[in-house]
């Protein structure tokens, strides 16, 4: 074979230079072709085609086999629709994250032939930790541990598995989880250290205080800042007293109500844009407890009658979500929902502090406030998708527009049809993600009764929901 | 709006469309006819290799067909609606397939009425009369004589064209292949134009596509690829000169037979079996045609047998829906275009697959099978292979290779889906061209894996 390669190389070099290759050809070929150069190229081509192959220019990397995940795959019959839903609709935001969360909430995993997380998909549910590790080529150096995570076997878990295991452990044994983090976080790089500290968000308690205080000496600004917000939630704010006093001078407290005199924190207009800018910056730095102290009121009083009209007011909600105690966060959320006028997007930082069960329970009341396309509800519900009963949806003001929009979408007026289709394209997939299984079936029947074809792709998410029976295998 | 015969007459673009639709009313031409609510759909075996998929909504009389006709509605849509009006019971109630849902998602409601329906009177009754007219034997004889004369003229013209191609090839060698690989586009275009004039349209198309095949390769591989392309051209030209009436060589050099020609050819091999759709490859050619290639694999066969359903349609006809879904299985009688290693085929009849079926066992050395194929048809650019158990591995740069436990690795033409790198592949179907492996589909520990073109 080496002789053949050498001969082909000589023949090729001759043709590259524009010379006759007959003299360079192997004797047998030369004898066969005589002076026929084109016959020689036919033989050379055939030899090159079936007798030689180029090898890799560098070493080939054998990836390990993609690991299994700990959930059943969705039924085969639903995969085609799932793939269709994954395709981002034209001019609309992708529903990939919500679709994956929805499928996970129903107890299923996506088939890897249909979806695999990207290396940057930090949002991927813990279920997919083995695939994230595989995608990131985050190979373990030792065999995986079958046991629960401990400080000793910590290295036997990949990074993604570690985070998932610690998050789960934090829910059942928060002290043990903290002790592992305390023992092993220092050896991790800053970004990962931060991610580990953030796990303390799950069941944060006074028992974590000492460890959080020790992080004041951490090398990373972001780790120190995160530790401070957690301490603030526990009522141990500190370090921004002077800034809190400055902010206190830029806001006012008023009393409202005739019988129940309640406190209202006002972000009154300031003289210059620079002052507004400064107030906004301070709102992002100062903790709720320190602001309350500077104003001489309790944290609870600051959230009694919340404002939402200004950017600073939004920043105040974020401040509360970041540094307020659980009790204050729930009070502010309740107050904002009660006044019914705040845009739902304002609530988002607060709902991230709720437990999964609280978010599920909150969904029906959020839908009542969602005046348009259920976009905000979807964001507020987070990963707790597919659990809203139809009764909650039908009571929502925006549900009333669904029937007329479907009729308009099938109507003769081009403008009305376009507008209605535009609304339905946004609303129906979101409703499909929110509703529970039985409600999805009922709503499909209702919608098709209004005139929308059952084959209409706008109903894809509802059909998917209706067909994906919750997985109950323990 | 209600779907009636009068409504069909009104929407038909012209009387010719109605007459053509009338000829399609035979049940045998429609392996699939189904309905769900106001939707009706079917698959019509038209003049192409792939069946046409037709869907209509009876409520607003919108319709869509995958045929390349510029008429709207086309004869297939008219025939579907006509059959439904005449006997809706022949349309089985069915689950709405994905391709129908896809059409529903993309259609613009209200835009389905023909913009310029002919004002001339159109009649279904007249269409049925025209279809029933007997053929004129004298006209048939004249037609055959004319075709024979044309074939003789074509042979003469092609021979002259191939003489020019010989000279052109020698010129490229004399000028040096380095010069050729630096400017293949203009050089190929010139000789391709000459071959079009010489009625060697198929060969012209192949040469016209050569630059894009070359430029898809890294620079250091292009000279070898040119040698391979030129060598195959020489083999093809010489084979045609020796037997210009050979149908396979005529197809490669001049043009393909029609579907009817293949069905009427007593030498065309018929194979009745269960087939799996491996995948579809669609590419737009420089001559403005889109080629739609559907690859099939015979299931339960002793040795691997592939079939290629190949259609061409103008790019200006717009995006065309896939004829099949990858992984579909059906029972069908395929008629292969006569060839030394038959590959291209048309579907003579088709029905649903019954029972369990498996891919055939792959050869232990797929490259030996490739070499055998190339002995039969050395001018072919690529050949389908069934690969045995193996893995796909990549270099650090990302270049992916097929690796079997034995034999040299084969480089993939395009990046595989991420799952393929983590799958234990038990069998795979691919196209090999001597330098790159175009994976189509694989069976693995994760089930079927489809590869993009």
Image (tube, coloured by chain):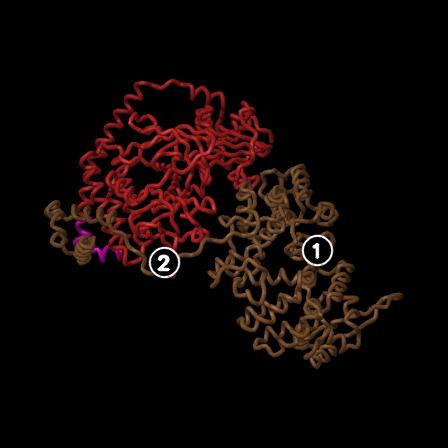
Residue B378 higher or lower than A131, as above or below = above
Label 2, secondary structure: give it. Answer: loop
Residue displayed at 62% across by 45% down: A465
Bounds of the magenta span? Answer: B168-181
Q: Chain of mark 1?
A: A
Give the camera-side residue of B134 and A368.
A368
Give percent across and percent down for residue A228.
Answer: 66, 74
Kindly tell me whether residue B14 is visible in this rendering: no
Mark 2 = which residue?
A60
Shown in red, the chain is: B
Image quarter of the N terminus of chain B: top right
Residues at circles 1 and 2 in contact by the CB criterion of under 8 Å:
no
Give percent across and percent down for residue B223.
Answer: 24, 55
Residue B442 among magenta residues: no
Mark 1 = which residue?
A357
Shown in brown, the chain is: A
Kindly tell me whether residue B149 is visible in this rendering: yes
N-terminal of the pair, mark 1 or mark 2, is 2
Residue B258 higher or lower than A339, as above or below = above
Horizontal relation, residue A92 to residue A330: left or right: left
Label 1, secondary structure: give it. Answer: helix
Residue displayed at 49% across by 23% down: B124
How far is mark 1 from mark 2, CA to CA?
Answer: 48 Å
Give percent across and percent down for residue B26.
Answer: 46, 23
Q: Chain of mark 2?
A: A
């Amino acid at each position: 074979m080496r002789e053949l390669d050498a001969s082909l190389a000589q023949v090729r070099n001759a043709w590259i230079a524009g010379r006759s290759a007959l003299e360079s050809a192997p004797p047998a070929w030369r004898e066969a072709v005589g002076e026929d150069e084109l016959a020689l190229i036919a033989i050379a081509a055939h030899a090159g085609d079936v007798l030689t192959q180029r090898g890799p220019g560098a070493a080939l990397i054998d990836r390990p086999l993609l690991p299994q995940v700990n959930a059943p795959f969705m039924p085969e019959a639903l995969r085609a629709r799932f793939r269709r839903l994954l395709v981002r609709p034209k001019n609309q935001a992708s529903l990939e994250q919500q679709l994956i969360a929805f499928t996970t909430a129903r107890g299923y995993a996506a088939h890897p032939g249909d979806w695999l997380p990207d290396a940057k998909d930090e949002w991927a549910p813990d279920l997919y930790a083995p695939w994230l590790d595989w995608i990131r080529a985050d190979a373990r150096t030792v065999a995986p541990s079958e046991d629960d995570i401990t400080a000793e076997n910590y290295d036997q878990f990949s990074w993604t598995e570690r985070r998932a295991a610690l998050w789960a452990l934090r829910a059942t044994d928060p002290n043990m989880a903290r002790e592992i983090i305390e023992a092993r976080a220092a050896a991790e790089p800053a970004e990962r250290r931060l991610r580990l500290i953030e796990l303390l968000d799950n069941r944060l308690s006074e028992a974590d205080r000492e460890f959080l205080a020790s992080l004041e000496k951490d090398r990373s600004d972001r780790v120190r800042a995160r530790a401070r917000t957690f301490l603030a939630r526990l009522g141990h704010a500190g370090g921004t007293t002077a800034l809190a006093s400055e902010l206190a001078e830029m806001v006012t407290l008023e009393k409202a109500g005739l019988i129940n005199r309640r406190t209202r924190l006002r972000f009154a207009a300031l003289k210059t844009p620079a002052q507004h800018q400064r107030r906004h910056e301070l709102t992002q730095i100062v903790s709720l407890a320190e602001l309350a102290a500077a104003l001489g009121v309790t944290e609870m009083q600051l959230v009694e009658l919340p404002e939402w009209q200004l950017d600073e007011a939004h920043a105040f909600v974020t401040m509360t979500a970041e540094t307020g105690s659980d009790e204050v966060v729930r009070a502010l959320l309740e107050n904002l929902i009660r006044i019914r006028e705040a845009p739902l997007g304002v609530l988002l930082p607060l709902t991230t502090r709720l437990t999964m069960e609280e978010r599920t329970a909150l969904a029906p009341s959020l839908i009542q406030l969602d005046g348009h396309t259920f976009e905000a509800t979807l964001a507020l519900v987070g990963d707790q998708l597919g659990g809203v009963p139809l009764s909650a949806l039908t009571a929502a003001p925006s549900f009333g527009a669904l029937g007329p929009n479907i009729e308009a979408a099938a109507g003769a007026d081009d403008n009305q049809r376009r507008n209605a289709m535009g609304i339905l394209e946004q609303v129906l997939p979101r409703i499909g993600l929110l509703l529970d299984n039985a409600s999805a079936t009922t709503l499909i029947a209702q919608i098709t009764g209004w005139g929308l074809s059952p084959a209409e792709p706008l109903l894809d998410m509802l059909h998917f929901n209706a067909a994906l029976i919750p997985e109950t295998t323990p | 709006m209600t779907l009636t015969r009068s409504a069909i007459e009104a929407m038909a673009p012209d009387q010719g469309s109605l007459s053509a639709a009338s000829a399609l009313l035979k049940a045998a031409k429609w392996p699939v006819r189904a309905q769900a609510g106001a939707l009706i759909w079917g698959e019509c075996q038209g003049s192409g290799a792939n069946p046409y998929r037709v869907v209509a909504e009876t409520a607003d009389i919108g319709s869509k067909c995958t045929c390349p006709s510029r008429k709207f509605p086309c004869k297939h849509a008219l025939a579907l609606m006509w059959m439904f009006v005449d006997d809706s019971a022949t349309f089985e109630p069915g689950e709405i397939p994905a391709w129908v849902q896809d059409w529903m998602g993309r259609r613009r409601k209200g835009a389905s009425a023909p913009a310029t329906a002919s004002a001339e009177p159109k009649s279904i009754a007249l269409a049925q009369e025209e279809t029933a007219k007997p053929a004129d034997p004298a006209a048939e004889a004249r037609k055959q004589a004319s075709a024979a004369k044309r074939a003789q003229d074509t042979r003469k013209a092609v021979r002259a064209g191939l003489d020019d191609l010989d000279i052109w090839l020698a010129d490229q060698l004399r000028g040096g292949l380095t010069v050729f690989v630096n400017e293949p586009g203009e050089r190929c275009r010139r000789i391709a134009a000459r071959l079009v004039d010489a009625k060697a349209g198929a060969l012209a198309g192949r040469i016209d596509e050569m630059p894009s095949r070359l430029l898809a390769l890294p620079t250091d591989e292009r000279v070898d690829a040119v040698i391979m392309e030129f060598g195959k051209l020489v083999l093809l030209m010489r084979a045609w000169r020796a037997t210009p009436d050979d149908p396979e060589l005529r197809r490669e050099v001049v043009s393909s037979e029609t579907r009817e020609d293949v069905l009427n050819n007593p030498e065309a091999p018929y194979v009745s079996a269960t087939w799996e759709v491996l995948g579809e490859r669609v590419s737009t050619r420089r001559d403005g045609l889109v080629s739609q290639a559907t690859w099939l694999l015979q299931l339960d066969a002793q040795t691997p047998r592939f079939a290629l359903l190949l259609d061409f349609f103008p790019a200006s006809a717009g995006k065309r829906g896939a004829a099949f879904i990858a992984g579909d299985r059906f029972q069908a009688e395929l008629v292969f275009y006569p060839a030394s290693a038959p590959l291209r085929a048309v579907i003579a009849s088709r029905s649903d697959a019954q029972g369990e079926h498996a891919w055939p066992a792959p050869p232990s050395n797929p490259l030996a099978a490739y070499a055998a194929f190339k002995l039969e048809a050395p001018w072919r650019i690529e050949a389908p292979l069934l690969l045995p158990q193996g893995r796909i591995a990549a270099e650090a740069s990302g270049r992916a290779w097929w690796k079997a436990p034995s034999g040299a690795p084969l480089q993939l033409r395009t990046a595989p889906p991420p799952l393929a790198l983590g799958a234990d592949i038990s069998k795979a179907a691919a196209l090999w061209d001597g330098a790159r492996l175009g994976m189509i589909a694989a069976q693995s520990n994760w089930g079927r894996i489809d590869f993009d073109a």
